[in-house]
Image: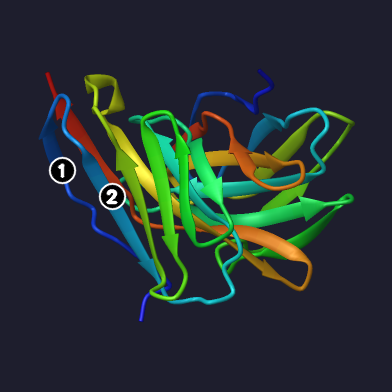
Amino acid sequence: EPEVTQTPSHQVTQMGQEVILRCVPISNHLYFYWYRQILGQKVEFLVSFYNNEISEKSEIFDDQFSVERPDGSNFTLKIRSTKLEDSAMYFCASRGTTVQYFGAGTRLSVL
Amino acid sequence: QKEVEQDPGPLSVPEGAIVSLNCTYSNSAFQYFMWYRQYSRKGPELLMYTYSSGNKEDGRFTAQVDKSSKYISLFIRDSQPSDSATYLCAFSKTQGGSEKLVFGKGTKLTVNP
């Protein structure tokens, strides 16, 4: 069964460092998303991406965040200068026609 | 008024029990209604989705939507210890051609053998 793949599963970084979280969406999907979940809180929308551009972004998705689809299979989330409060699970999702399917997530720990 | 409200539980039931999980919402523009299951430190796994009022059944799971009351439910029959997880209701919201999901906080369910 096709699935969304995310790497790494756990990323530890120092405050102020740049991180790139990687995702391989389901192959025939055209809509891509990033969500985050701070420990103990609900899953929150960050950004949606379609046709090589951002469709919508939340208030959380400020200038420190960027997304890219560098080739035909990968979808990345970059955080330029990480803060302690960026520590969370980050989930990539993709959609074909109707529903979004999620990856297992990357746990980002900012020290 | 919050856009989505979900009782976080926790909910603990014996094996074989019928489980009822619920969410209320305030946004009439929500288009799809979904239930995801999330195991600890894992990604949300889609269980069921529907777009209309009424019931939809899949094995031991039944999703119920009442658009007039803005209320959705997930029923689990003959619950198993493997059903122990956090259950998230999610709602599809479309704005200006873009779609995103709005999640409830999740209800943590434990099924005891």
Give the quarter of the image for residue B42: top left
Report the mark closest to the observer, 2 or 1: 2
In-image side of B56 versus B96 (left or right): left
Q: Do the residues labelled 2 and 1 touch (CB within 8 Å)?
A: yes
Q: What element carries label 2?
A: strand
**Picture residue at 41% right of the left edge, 54% below the top:** B64
Q: Mark 2 sits on what residue?
A: B21
Q: Mark 1 sits on what residue?
A: B11
Residue A88 or residue B61, whichever sits in front: B61
Residue A24: give x, y in percent of width and height. Answer: 72, 28
**Picture residue at 39% right of the left edge, 47% below the top:** B88
Q: Is mark 1 on a helix, strand or loop?
A: strand
Residue B112 or residue A61, whichever sits in front: B112
Give the quarter of the image for residue B77: top left
Residue B49: give x, y in percent of width and height. Answer: 54, 46
User: Mark 2 or mark 1, which has the lower sequence index?
Assistant: 1
**Label 2: few (<14), some or many (≥20) within 10 Å?**
many
Q: Which amino acid does label 1 sit on?
A: Leu
